[in-house]
């Protein structure tokens, strides 16, 4: 495990928990209006889900929540803060900003170059 002080570990645990709760709230808000749909409107609603709910956003949020859960587990098991690729310390500042980070900045940069996300729409 990376060499963090007790105060830093508390800060990281707090950051993980705050981000988790924030994502949970965002997902609930995104899905909240689905509770008001009657049975007769359900078929039409299901056909228009992409119009009503940003499913990609909710999917990303759920995946980030899973990463946060894993990071919380690693923190409690003292396996937190080391890069999964090179084994070096990720860095307190990076983890404070992005609590579920699994790679140091250098390895994350290399990973993003090797596996670029296809976020651009294609024609």
Image (cartoon, helix red, strand yellow):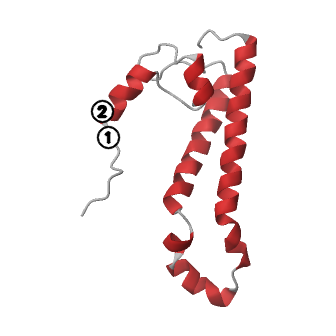
What residue is disc 2 on?
A: 113
What residue is disc 1 on?
A: 116
- Label 2 Cα neighbours within 10 Å, binned few <14 / some 14-19 / many ≥20: few
At mark 1, the secondary structure is loop
Q: Residue at x 51, y 73 (%)?
A: 51
The answer to whether residue 82 is above or below residue 38 is above
How far apart are labels 2 and 1 at the CA level? 6 Å
Q: Quadrant of residue 99?
A: top right
In the drawing, does residue 67 fall left or right of residue 17? left
Q: State the quadrant of the N terminus.
A: top right
Q: Quadrant of residue 122?
A: bottom left
Q: Residue at x 35, y 34 (%)?
A: 112
Residue 36, image x, y percentages: 73, 78
Q: Nearer the viewer, residue 112 or 78?
A: 112
The answer to the question of whether label 2 and label 1 lie on touching residues, with beta carbons closer than 8 A, is: yes
The answer to whether residue 64 is above or below residue 83 is below
């Amino acid at each position: 495990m990376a060499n963090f002080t007790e105060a830093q570990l508390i800060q990281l645990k707090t950051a993980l928990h705050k981000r988790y709760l924030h994502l949970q709230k965002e997902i609930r808000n995104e899905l909240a209006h689905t509770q008001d749909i009657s049975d007769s409107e359900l078929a039409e609603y299901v056909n228009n889900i992409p119009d009503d709910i940003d499913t990609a956003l909710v999917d990303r949020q759920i995946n980030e929540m899973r990463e946060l859960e894993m990071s919380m587990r690693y923190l409690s098991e003292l396996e937190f803060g080391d890069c999964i690729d090179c084994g070096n310390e990720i860095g307190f500042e990076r983890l404070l900003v992005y609590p579920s980070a699994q790679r140091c900045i250098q390895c994350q940069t290399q990973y993003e170059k090797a596996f670029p996300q296809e976020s651009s729409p294609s024609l």
